């Protein structure tokens, strides 16, 4: 792109603060911040505030039913102990490879072909 003299804007995305992680989680699951604080502290500790890792970690908690919506109580619930014990991948390449391996074989094959283009 640079050879073609196309303007490229680099956007440096830093980590978000512990408070911002709490705000994100509180807003996402519609629960007051004082009730999500201990959970968001765990999420922050696991992710270091990396926005990609925060969203992926929350997704993995939901996938593994450690973060669930209770129809009975009409509220989100989470397992703090299991969330704290859960390991997180801290390498974006490994994280994306794991996500790709979860796709159907046909999709994985298409991604491999597209990677060659």
Image (cartoon, rainbow, N blue to C red):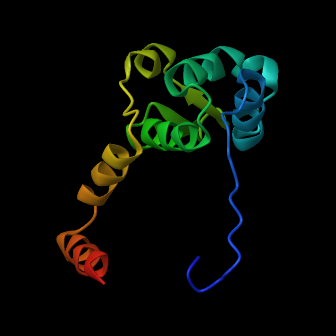
Corner quadrant of residue 89: top left
Question: Residue at the spot x=62%, y=29% of the render?
Answer: 49
Q: Compared with residue 15, is residue 99 higher up or lower down, i.e. above or below?
A: below
Closest to the observer, 53 or 15:
15
| Image position, residue 2 (x, y; %) | 59, 76
Q: Is residue 92 above or below residue 32?
A: below
Above or below: residue 75 compared with residue 55: above
Q: Say above or below: 106 vs 37.
A: below
Residue at (45% x, 30% y) in the render: 66
Side of 83 relative to 89 (left or right): right
Quarter of the picture containing the N terminus is bottom right
| Depth check, front residue: 104 or 46 | 46
Q: Residue 29, how many percent across, how many down?
A: 69, 39
Quadrant housing residue 81? top left
Depth check, front residue: 93 or 27: 93
Across and down, in percent, residue 73 comes to 64, 32
Q: Which residue is drawn at the image coordinates 70% and 33% (left, top)?
A: 16
Quadrant in the picture for the C terminus: bottom left
- Residue 37, quarter of the rendered image: top right
- What count of labels does the image hold? 0
**Left/right of residue 66 with respect to residue 28 in the rendered view:** left
Question: Going 55% across and 18% down the picture, which residue do you hit?
Answer: 45
The image position of residue 101, as x and y in percent, is 23, 57
């Amino acid at each position: 792109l640079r050879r073609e003299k196309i303007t490229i804007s680099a956007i440096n995305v830093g980590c978000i603060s512990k408070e911002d992680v709490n705000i994100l989680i509180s807003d996402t699951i519609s629960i007051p911040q004082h009730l999500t604080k201990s959970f968001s502290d765990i999420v922050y500790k696991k992710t270091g505030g990396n926005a990609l890792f925060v969203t992926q970690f929350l997704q993995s908690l939901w996938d593994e039913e450690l973060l669930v919506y209770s129809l009975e109580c009409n509220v989100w619930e989470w397992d703090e102990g299991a969330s704290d014990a859960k390991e997180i991948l801290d390498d974006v390449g490994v994280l994306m490879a794991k996500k790709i391996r979860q796709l159907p074989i046909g999709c994985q094959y298409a991604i491999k072909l597209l990677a060659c283009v």
